[in-house]
Image (spheres, rainbow, N blue to C red):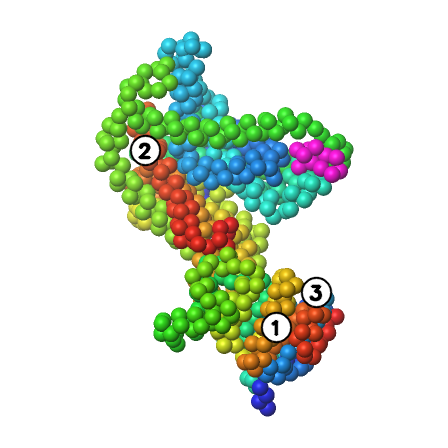
Amino acid sequence: MLVPVLAGLLGTLGPAFGYLPALGGTALTLDPFRDLANTPGIGRASLLSLTTGFAATGLSLFIVALICAAWSGTRAFRAIERALSPLLAVPHAAAAFGLAFLIAPSGWMARIVSPWLSGWVRPPDLLVLQDPFGISLTAGLVVKEIPFLLLMTLAALSQIRADQTRRISNALGYAPVTGWFKTVFPLVYGQIRLPIYAVLAFSMTVIDVALILGPTTPPPLAVQILKWMNDPDLSMRFLASAGAVWQLALVVLALLCWRTLEWLAARIGRAWVRAGSRGGATGALKAASLLAAILVAAAIVFGLLGLLIWSVAGFWSFPNALPDSFTARTWMRHATGLWPAITETLLIAAIATAVALFLTLACLEAEERHGIKPSTRALLLLYLPLIVPQIAFLSGLQTLAIFTGLDAGRTSVIFVHIIFVLPYVFLSLGDPFRSWDMRYGLVARALGASPDGVLWRVRLPILLRPILTAAAVGFAVSVGQFLPTLLAGAGRVQTLTTEAVALASGGDRRVIAVYALTQTGAAFLPFAIAIFVPAILWRNRRGLRHV
Amino acid sequence: MSRAGLTLERVAIRHGTRKLVEIDTHVGPGETLTVMGPSGSGKSTLLSFLIGSLDPSFAAQGRVLLDGTDITETSPEYRRIGILLQDDLLFPHLSVGENLAFGLDTTRLPRARRREQIEHALDDIGLSGFANRDPATLSGGQKARIALMRMLLSEPKALLLDEPFSRLDAQRRAQIRELVFERARAKGLPVLLVTHDREDAIAAGGRVHSLD
C-alpha cells in the first residue's frame, strides 16, 4: 500500500519543482509554484477546498453523533442500520446526479411546489446548483458521508459496550443524549478518528461530485488540477503537479487544524462533563436527529427515483411534477453505448475485488497462524490511500507511467483500483473474521483437518456471508471510482462512472439518468448476491442466519 | 518404555513468572483422570497444551506421550486426541450427517461405505434418520450425542473432556455423562476430564488431581 502512494507522491513532487527530464525540465526551480500563485482564482479555489472539507466533515460527524446519541438501542435505530448498506452502495456520482435533479431550479422540488405555491411557471433564475459557495457540493458530500461514518460508528459502538455505559449514565440521572455525549462519544471518537480524517481529505479533494454539484468559476482546487493535467499542452503538467503538491499541503494543514480542534473540543468537553449538568431536551434532539436521518435517506432515494423517471420521460414541461408521457426510447438508443461500459466496469471491479479479497484473506489468516497482533500503525497504513488525496499521488503515478513508457490501460486501472478497494475489503472483513469462534478450528484440527482444511472446509463456508458482503463493498468502491479510472486509463478506459461524469457538462438529463442508474445497478448487483446466495445456500442452516 | 495410555511426563506450564499447572501422571486405557480446580486455575490451558494449540504466550515444559509415542511436537491433526468442549460446536454449515462425516477419514472409504457408517453411527446413539437435519434444529442432548459420535468416528486414542456436560440440564446431564464414559471404557480410551463440578468427578470414578 505504501509503495504506490509514495511512488505517486514522488512523481508529483518532481515536476512540481520543475524536474521532468522528458519535458526538458532538469533543473530544480520554484517556477511552477510561482505560476500557481499567479493563477487567477487560486486563492478562492483553495478556500473552497477548505470550506467544503470542513463543512461536510463537521456536519456529517455532528449528525451521525446526534443520531447515535438519540436513537442507539431502539427499534428505529435498527431500521436505520438496515437502510445503511444500500445507501452506502449508491455511487457518489449517481447520488450527486440524483440530488442535482432534485434541487435544481427546474428540478423535482421546484416542480412540486409550482405553480400553486411558488407561482413559478418557468424555472426560477436561481443559482442553486453549482453555487459559488459550494453549498450544494457540501450537501451532496454530507448525504454520502453520513452513511459511511454511521457504519464506522456502529462498528465502534459494538466494541465498547455502549449500551451498558448509557444505562449507567441514565441511572445517574443524565438525559439520554447528554449522557451519550458525555460517556460514549469520547470512546467512539477515538475509534472513528481515521475514518473521519479520510472523510475530511476526501471532501476537500473530491472530483466527480464537484464536477456535478460544485461551482465552476473558479472550480474547487482538485477540479482545476485535473483540467491542467488533461491540457493538451504537456508543459501544463508542471503547473498541475505544483497544484497537486499545494492540494496535499492544504489537506495536511486541514488535518492539523482538525487535530487542534479535537484537542480543544476535548478540553471544553471535559469541563462540560465535570460540570455534571444532566441535560434534557431529549424529545427535541430525538426529533431533530431523526429528521436529519430521514432527509439524508430521502435525498438519495428520491434522487434515484428522479433519475428513474427522467430516464423514461418523454416530453416533460416545467411545472408538471410528472412527465407528460413515458418512453423507453432513451434506454433503447443508448443500449449499444452502454454495453461496452457495463462490461468494462464489471470486469475491472470483479478482478480488483477478487485480488483484494484474496490479499485480505491471506493477511488475516497469516495474522492468525503466526499470532501477529495488528497494530495501530498497520491500521494507519491501511487508511493511507484513503487519506492522502487521490489527485496528489495519482497524478504522479500517471506522470511516472507516461514517461517510463508503461502503458495506461485496463491493467493499470485495475492495479490502481486495488489500492482503493483493498482498504475497504479489509476493514469490512477484519472484524467478522477475527471474531470467529476459534474453537471450531480447534475441534476440526482434533478431528484430523489440516490448517488449510480448517480454512477451506470450516472457516470460509461459515463466514460466507461477511466475505460476500466485503466483496460487495469492494465491488461498489471500484464501480464508483472516477479519478483513478480516468488517470490510470489515460481517458481510454471508459467505465459507467467516467461516462456518466463526462455527460454532466452536456446537461441531457435523460442520458445522464440512464448512465447514473446503470452505474447504481452495477454497484447494487453484488450486494444482492451477498444477500441471496447465503440465503439460498444456507436456507436449511438456522445457525448461520446471524453470522 | 512403551506404556499404553496417555502419559504426562513432568508437565509444567507457566505464564510469565506465574506457574499455572504442574502435573506428572499416567492415564491407562479405560481409566479416567479428573482434573479439578476453580476457573482461572489453568485447566483449559492444560488441555490446549495436550491438543497442541497452546497460545505462544505460555511456556510449557515436559512431554506428552500417547501409547508410548512422544506427541509433544506433533500438529493437532496428527495427535489422535479427541476433544469435547463445553459447547457442542457442531459445524453450523454442515448437516448432521456431514458433521459426522467430517470425523471420518475421508480418503480411505468409498462413498457408499461412508454413508453406511454414518447411518450406523446415528442408529447407535438413537438418532436414526437424522443425517439430513440442520444441527441448529436439534435439542441440547441430541447435539451433545452427535458431537460425541463425531469425535469417536475420528478414532481417537485418548479423550479430553472440558466440562462437556455443564451446559446441559440436570436430567440430560446424567444421561450424556453415562454415555460418554461407557463409550470410552468400551473402546479402552484413556480419558482426561477437567471440571469444577464435584458430581462429574464422582461419576467419572477415577483419580482426581486438584489444581489451585
- Image location (x, y in percent) of residue A84: 49, 38
The residue closer to the viewer here, B80 or A247, is B80
- Image location (x, y in percent) of residue A149: 53, 38
Locate residue B27: give its quadrant.
bottom right
In the rendered image, which residue does mark 2 sit on?
A515
Q: Which residues are magenta?
A: A170-180
Majority secondary structure in the magenta region: helix
Q: Is residue A518 left or right of residue A79?
A: left
Mark 1 chain: B
- B202 to A439, vertically: above or below: below
- Image location (x, y in percent) of residue B33: 66, 78
* Element carrying mark 2: helix
Residue that sits furthest to the bottom in the current view: B1
Residue B40's disc number: 3
Q: Both on one chain, marks 2 and 1?
A: no
Residue A179 within the magenta-colored segment of the rendering? yes
Q: Is residue B10 left or right of residue A542?
A: right
